[in-house]
Amino acid sequence: MIPTPHIEVENKDLIAKTVLMPGDPLRAKYIADNFLTKVEKINDVRNMWGYTGYYGKKKVTVMGSGMGMPSIGIYSYELYNFYGVENIIRIGSCGAYTKDLNLYDVVLVNQAYSESSYAKTMGVSSRKTLSASKPLNNKIIKAGEKLNIKLHICNIHSSDVFYRLKHDEFKEIHEKYGADAVEMESFALFANAKALKKKAACLLTVSDSLITHEATTSQERQEAFTKMMEVALNSL
Ligand SMILES: O=P(O)(O)O[C@H]1O[C@H](CO)[C@@H](O)[C@H]1O
Ligand SMILES: O=c1cc[nH]c(=O)[nH]1
């Protein structure tokens, strides 16, 4: 079924086997403009921009996922199931739940805890915690070592809610589930990868801290998270 309702690509070959997915389509454009050669824009539907190009000799697609699990659920399912994509590496931003993570630190997700019903509703798992793909994580760890960029390997909270009324609830989630940071997509991405026997990983840059209340600007979230981008690109 291609094109799909959300991706207008008619020729599967225009999408690489590995896709890097930031939540923000402008971050996808930034990567295409600054790191890739022979770039072709592949998607404009809903302004969820996607680009295919080359990093060195490696073909790669970068495409926004939108915010939240329903959104990445749609895009990652269509990429895996209809376009033959094998690997998706989410490259997102996260909030720190611990004083041990500082702004701009790069986190590689080991497991994502979520209160979301996404995996259960999909019929893939009734577990509240899902893991990233180990082979993909191993490649990312090697790329971090090669570039001398420290990766904080963490369990995280993949949340359905950005603005909570109970501001301190994160402390309980940190204690109970060992979640050191929060974002909003990896649990659905890992569920789709599990359902479709594909690989998924999630790299995050700390954009704010729920402990110190320091925060980066929207411009920085779009453009300044280059260490994470380089690690993802060097893992290809
Ligand atoms: O920067 P991205 O990749 O969008 O990730 C994080 O930022 C958004 C919230 O501001 C959510 O999508 C969250 O997961
Ligand atoms: O989901 C997110 C992402 C970044 N920062 C947060 O506090 N939450």
Image (cartoon, rainbow, N blue to C red):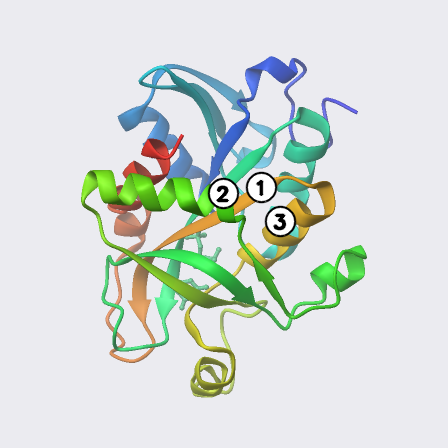
Cβ of disc 2 within 8 Å of ligand 1? no
Q: Give the camera-side residue of 213 and 148.
A: 148
**In this view, the mark in front (1 or 3):** 1
Residue 127 image point, x, y percent: 69, 68
Please say if the residues under marks 1 and 3 sit with CB atoms less than 8 Å apart. Answer: no
The answer for how far apart the CA atoms under marks 1 and 3 are is 18 Å
Position of residue 93 relative to residue 84, above or below, is below
Identify residue for label 2. Answer: 135
Q: Across the whole image, how many numbered discs are drawn on residues?
A: 3
Q: Give the camera-side residue of 134 and 13.
A: 134
Amino acid of disc 1: Lys
Q: Give the camera-side residue of 115 and 63.
A: 115
Q: Is residue 150 visible?
A: yes
Position of residue 85 relative to residue 40, above or below, is below
Residue 117 image point, x, y percent: 72, 67
Identify residue for label 3. Answer: 71
Position of residue 103 relative to residue 67, above or below, is below
Q: Residue at x 53, y 22 (%)?
A: 16
Please say if the residues under marks 1 and 2 sit with CB atoms less than 8 Å apart. Answer: yes
Q: Residue at x 74, y 61 (%)?
A: 125
The answer for how far apart the CA atoms under marks 2 and 3 are is 25 Å
- The crowding category of the residue bearing disc 2, from other C-alpha atoms within 10 Å (few below 14, some 14 to 19, many at least 20), is few
